[in-house]
Image (cartoon, grey):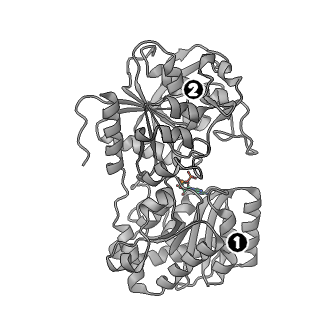
């Protein structure tokens, strides 16, 4: 149990995506489930987000609160108040900048919107105004919690607002996305020219929203303890490692939780048959349903390797492709869902055509199929080169689908390798390899496929994973601890 918050802790949570209204990745899942956990613990939280068309449509009982004049090249906008589908109070920035079809960051062809600086400058600016005595609304946060580069300028704007203001923290969900724009952006966004310097928003001659957030926020968190260390090194610091080393004592890694209602094998509406650790044989019905749906051969004993991912270099899709023929020949079936890089999409489809009934590929985004793969597959592969937290390895463990992962970030923090020692002490929950190479992926998969034949050990690994607590409770308590320290 998280201890109740005694004095009223008010928090503004600034984010650019919230599931199910708008989602491109894990940030949306976290922006939906962490605020719920915080609210249940007594935090008075409001989520501030852009009013994309799907958000305006999906927000319940909304009303217009007030309007804001333009500053710099940021146009005037309206502030709406309402409730997210999960009941968390939301504040919505309603602006011409967000009211357009397409994705949150790019158009239908995958090209970045040319005015992303203004769009997320506006979101950041609104985060700052609402967190200060300049706010026209009565509700005032004691802490403003910024997420990723899109909210990264909130602490910078707050620097230049006089009067009382909230304390700031920023969470890095993925350091690879940094919101970099030309120096002229500073004046477009109505910021003081003096902030364009190395001790400010300047980043190798340009400006970076994320760098600004990391520089000006009082506290920095990221989404796993291992990633908190990794981003301070050259390999995964993406140029920010110097600043992050400098701020090391203010950085905390907190492993994300998952939405245990949405991802529950005992009540998942997308799957063929409910199951749990005591009723594991029922998982077989989900395997058969997955084989039918994806056109795989109906073979109970054939292991299915699942993979759901953005198809990118980060996720190691290229290395997976180099290993896929060998994995299929193991033999095993492959059930793949993803979208992203066009060349990788084509290569996966070629692979499926070459192995009918054995390799099934679905290109696109499909929430239902994602649940069905988690429920029906036997193992789940994540060859990510880096993974700040990762969610699927936790969903997999909950669904008795044994994860096979690279030893990085949150994958390292949430999967226990099935070494003989960990099998003996019954702590093993998956298979972990070091470094994303074809040899490492094939080697770990072979270990998994060999262990799969030993039904007793396999069941034990499944059950250990299924009994782990990946709910938000513990992690939300750690966020509250930091909010309290900041709020004083
Ligand atoms: P990232 O945010 O880097 O993409 P995460 O593992 O943190 O990675 O979160 C990705 C989320 O998106 C997971 O919930 C995953 O299941 C989901 N996902 C990714 N690709 C697809 C897809 N093509 N269809 C359905 N869900 C997907």
Closer to the camera: disc 2 or disc 1?
2
Residue 17 is drawn in which quadrant? Answer: top right
Q: Earlier in the sequence, mark 2 or mark 1?
A: 2
Residue appearing at x 57%, y 63% in the figure: 369
Q: Which mark is residue 322?
A: 1
Residue 443 visible somewhere in the drawing = yes
Residue at disc 1, secondary structure: helix
Residue 373 coordinates in the image, percent (x, y): 54, 67
Residue 351 coordinates in the image, percent (x, y): 73, 73
Residue appearing at x 63%, y 77% in the figure: 296
Q: Is residue 257 left or right of residue 200?
A: left
Residue that badge 2 annotates? 200
* Crowd band around label 2 with a 10 angstrom C-alpha radius: few (<14), some (14–19), many (20+): some
Residue appearing at x 38%, y 42% in the figure: 36
Residue 341 is drawn in which quadrant? Answer: bottom right
- Asked whether 178 or 88 is in front, the reply is 178
């Amino acid at each position: 149990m998280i201890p109740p918050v005694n004095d009223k802790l008010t928090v503004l949570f600034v984010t650019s995506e919230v599931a199910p209204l708008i989602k491109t990745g894990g940030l949306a899942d976290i922006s939906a489930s962490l605020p719920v956990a915080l609210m249940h613990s007594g935090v008075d939280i409001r989520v501030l987000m852009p009013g994309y068309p799907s958000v305006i449509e999906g927000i319940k009982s909304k009303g217009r609160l007030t309007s804001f004049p333009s500053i710099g090249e940021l146009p005037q906008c309206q502030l709406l108040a309402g409730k997210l589908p999960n009941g968390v109070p939301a504040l919505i920035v309603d602006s011409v900048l967000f009211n357009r079809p397409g994705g949150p960051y790019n158009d239908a062809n995958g090209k970045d919107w040319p005015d992303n600086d203004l769009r997320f400058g506006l979101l950041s600016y609104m985060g700052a105004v609402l967190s200060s005595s300049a706010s026209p609304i009565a509700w005032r946060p004691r802490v403003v919690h910024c997420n990723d580069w899109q909210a990264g300028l909130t602490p910078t704007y707050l620097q230049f607002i006089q009067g009382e203001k909230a304390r700031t923290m920023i969470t890095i969900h993925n350091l690879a996305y940094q919101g970099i724009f030309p120096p002229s952006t500073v004046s477009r966004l109505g910021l003081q020219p003096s902030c364009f310097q190395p001790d400010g928003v300047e980043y190798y001659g340009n400006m970076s929203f994320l760098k600004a957030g990391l520089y000006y926020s009082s506290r920095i968190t990221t989404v796993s303890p291992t990633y908190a260390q990794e981003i301070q090194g050259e390999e995964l610091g993406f140029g920010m490692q110097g600043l992050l080393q400098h701020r090391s004592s203010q950085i905390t890694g907190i492993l994300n939780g998952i939405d245990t209602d949405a991802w529950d094998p005992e009540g998942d509406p997308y799957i063929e048959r409910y199951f749990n650790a005591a009723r594991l044989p029922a998982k077989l019905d989900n395997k058969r349903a997955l084989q039918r749906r994806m056109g795989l051969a109906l073979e109970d004993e054939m292991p299915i390797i699942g993979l759901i991912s953005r198809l990118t270099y980060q996720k190691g899709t290229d290395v997976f492709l180099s290993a896929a023929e060998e994995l299929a020949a193991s033999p095993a079936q492959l059930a793949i869902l993803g979208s992203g890089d066009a060349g990788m999409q084509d290569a996966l489809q070629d692979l499926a055509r070459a192995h009918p009934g054995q390799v099934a590929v679905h290109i696109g985004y499909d929430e239902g199929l994602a649940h069905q793969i988690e429920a029906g597959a036997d193992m789940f592969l994540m060859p990510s080169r880096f993974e700040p937290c990762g969610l699927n390895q936790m969903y997999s463990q909950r669904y008795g689908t044994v994860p096979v992962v690279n030893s990085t970030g949150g994958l390292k923090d949430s999967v226990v390798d099935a070494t003989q020692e960990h099998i003996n002490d019954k702590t093993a929950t998956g298979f972990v390899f070091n470094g994303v190479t074809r040899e490492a992926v094939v080697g770990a998969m072979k270990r998994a496929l060999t262990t799969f034949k030993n039904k007793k050990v396999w069941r034990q690994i499944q059950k250990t994973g299924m009994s782990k607590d990946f709910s938000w409770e513990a992690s939300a308590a750690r966020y509250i601890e930091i909010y309290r320290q900041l709020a004083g």
